[in-house]
């Protein structure tokens, strides 16, 4: 007959719990062992001696054809040249794909002119996808003797020392001049875009005392626009130019500050060609001109509009 165990021989509650959880403790212990082994392996890979020993194996793996760059796709770039992007990536088709560092390439691309941010994807199939998001400049702002690219809100767009083809953007953008021109340029440029014939004649827009605009035309003429009424004045100028070709005529000043009046100052007539002073041969038979026959210089009166233009010139009257 089997003798029942005494109370002293019975296992404790903890022992009973460990026996019941034995199936769960074994996998957990295995995971902890593997985690420790992986951590030790990761730390050992940082040791230069271990890296040197593993270098031949790494080079052998990187040399296989299945881990080489097969194609590079670039999209989103409008002002940044493709060659500049490829130079910043530092990789070409045929190079080991695992040698390509996404973080290093992103840092170099961020230094290119007009680049706002970059997205780069590297695939083990050998494809590298690059998406460029540019901060497009809206105009060139000249103030205090400096030229800066600005966006539509008037904020500065870093050019980051652009050279070569990237610098061509300066010649393709509208030029605005003066204090406050950067924040007020968008509305004026949008109005000019509605009248392409007038816009084609405009070389720069000058902000006068941060109140109104003067348009400097390519032939040197100046158009004085009214304060806060730029749109009606430009549309009226386009209609006048369509019938009279005013912007192609030799004028110095077009004052449109009054809605019911248009003042035009034309260029003075060309001076007569100078006499042939270099001809040393004289006809002694011809009598010398009499003093009374010598033409007297004629002084041309100044048009009142020139005085108004002088008053509106920000360089001469900056406190206007």
Image (cartoon, grey):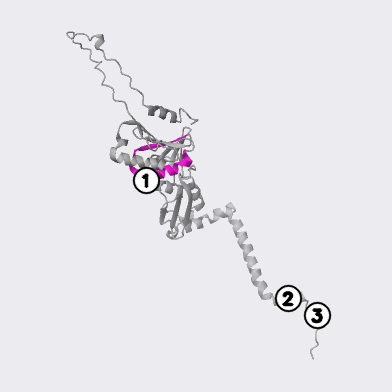
Q: What's the mark number on residue 194?
A: 1
Q: In the orientation shown, which residue stands out farthest toward the front?
A: 260
Q: Earlier in the sequence, mark 3 or mark 2?
A: 3
Q: What's the mark number on residue 9?
A: 3
Mark 3 vs mark 1: give the one in front. Answer: 1
Task: Name the residue that disc number 2 marks.
Answer: 17
Residue 275: x, y in percent? 25, 17
What residue appears at the point 46 percent right and 51 percent down from the top-left corner? 133
Nearest the viewer among 65 and 294 is 294
Nearest the viewer among 58 and 206 is 206
Query: Quick one: SS at disc 1?
Result: helix
Query: Quick one: SS at disc 3?
Result: helix
Looking at the picture, does residue 99 appear above or below residue 272? below
Q: In the orientation shown, which residue stands out farthest toward the left?
A: 285
Mark 3 vs mark 2: give the one in front. Answer: 2
Looking at the picture, does residue 124 appear above or below residue 134? below
Distance (Cα) linking label 3 and label 2: 16 Å
> Magenta part of the protein: which range?
181-208
Q: Quadrant of residue 192?
A: top left
């Amino acid at each position: 007959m089997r003798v029942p165990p005494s109370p002293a021989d019975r296992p404790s509650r903890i022992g009973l719990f460990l026996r019941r959880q034995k199936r769960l403790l074994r996998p957990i212990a295995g995971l902890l062992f593997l985690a420790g082994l992986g951590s030790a392996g990761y730390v050992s890979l940082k040791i230069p001696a271990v890296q040197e020993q593993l270098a031949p194996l790494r080079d052998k793996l990187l040399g296989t054809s299945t881990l080489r760059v097969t194609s590079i796709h670039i999209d989103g770039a409008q002002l940044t040249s493709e060659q500049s992007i490829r130079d910043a990536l530092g990789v070409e088709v045929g190079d080991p794909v695992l040698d390509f560092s996404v973080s290093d390439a992103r840092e170099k691309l961020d230094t290119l002119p007009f680049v706002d941010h970059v997205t780069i994807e590297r695939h083990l199939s050998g494809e590298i996808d690059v998406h460029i998001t540019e901060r497009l400049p809206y105009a060139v702002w000249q103030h205090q003797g400096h030229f800066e690219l600005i966006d539509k809100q008037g904020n500065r767009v870093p050019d980051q020392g652009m050279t070569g083809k990237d610098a061509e953007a300066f010649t393709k953008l509208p030029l605005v001049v003066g204090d406050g021109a950067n924040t007020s340029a968008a509305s004026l440029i949008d109005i000019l875009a509605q009248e392409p014939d007038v816009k084609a004649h405009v070389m720069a827009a000058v902000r006068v005392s941060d109140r109104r605009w003067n348009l400097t035309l390519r032939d040197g003429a100046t158009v004085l626009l009214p304060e806060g009424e730029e749109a009606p004045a430009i549309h009226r100028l386009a209609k006048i130019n369509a019938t009279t070709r005013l912007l192609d005529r030799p004028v110095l000043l077009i004052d449109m500050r009054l809605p019911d009046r248009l003042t035009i100052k034309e260029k003075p007539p060309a001076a007569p060609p100078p006499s042939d002073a270099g001809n040393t041969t004289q006809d002694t038979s011809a009598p010398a001109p009499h003093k009374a026959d010598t033409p007297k210089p004629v002084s041309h009166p100044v048009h009142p509009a020139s005085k108004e233009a002088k008053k509106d010139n920000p360089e001469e009257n900056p406190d206007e």
